[in-house]
Amino acid sequence: MICTMTDTLPTNNTDPRICRQCRGRCCQGHAGIWVDPRRFLTIFGLPLPASPADLRMQIAGSHLELREIDGVPLPAPQQTDDGCMFLGDHGCRLSPAQRPCQCLALTPVLETLLDDTIHCTLPAAGSTLTALRNWRRFWDER
């Protein structure tokens, strides 16, 4: 699992030269998600929710949302017409310690700049599939 409370956070994989030129194509598509439920709750100082509806109420007005993927509610930054709510003129407005696990785990690849297609890589531990498993288990335990 990536971004767990028991592990140290993964190195912020941004490559300042590539990311500055790219200007957040990954963030313009859609915001990353938090893979580890307990890390998410700790970052935002939230109590353990009894249900997805409870968590929706807790994050209301915070620029966060629960995105339903394959029937599993996963927390993510809200989407705007330009992508992630937290994408600013100078990059992400969240500190690295607050960023979604997927954002921290994404590794920039130079080819992204060459053909205007995102080639950045994401390890399996930061994948949506891993997040689905973690959050499904979390919600099942409620």
Image (cartoon, rainbow, N blue to C red):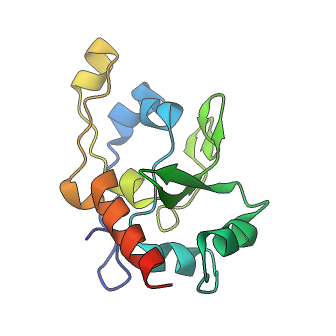
Horizontally, residue 85 falls left or right of residue 74, namely right
Q: Return the x and y of residue 24 as percentages of the image width and height.
A: 47, 33
Does any portion of residue 127 appear in the rendered image? Answer: no
Q: Quadrant of residue 137?
A: bottom left
**Position above or below: 89 against 43:** above
Q: Nearer the viewer, residue 102 or 127?
A: 127
Q: Quadrant of the N terminus?
A: bottom left
Say how many tags the image has: 0
Q: Quadrant of residue 133?
A: bottom left
Which residue reaches farthest top? 115
**Position above or below: 99 against 117:** below
User: In percent of the image, x 64 and y 55: which residue is there?
Assistant: 65
User: In percent of the image, x 65 and y 57: which residue is there?
Assistant: 64
Does any portion of residue 101 appear in the rendered image? Answer: yes
Horizontally, residue 54 falls left or right of residue 97, namely right
Horizontally, residue 122 falls left or right of residue 81, namely left
Q: Nearer the viewer, residue 101 or 22?
A: 101
Horizontally, residue 119 falls left or right of residue 40, namely left
Which residue reaches farthest right? 61
Q: Return the x and y of residue 71 as percentages of the image width and height.
A: 46, 55
Q: Return the x and y of residue 142 as percentages of the image width and height.
A: 51, 84
**Position above or below: 56 against 66:** below
User: In percent of the image, x 42 and y 69: which residue is there?
Assistant: 135
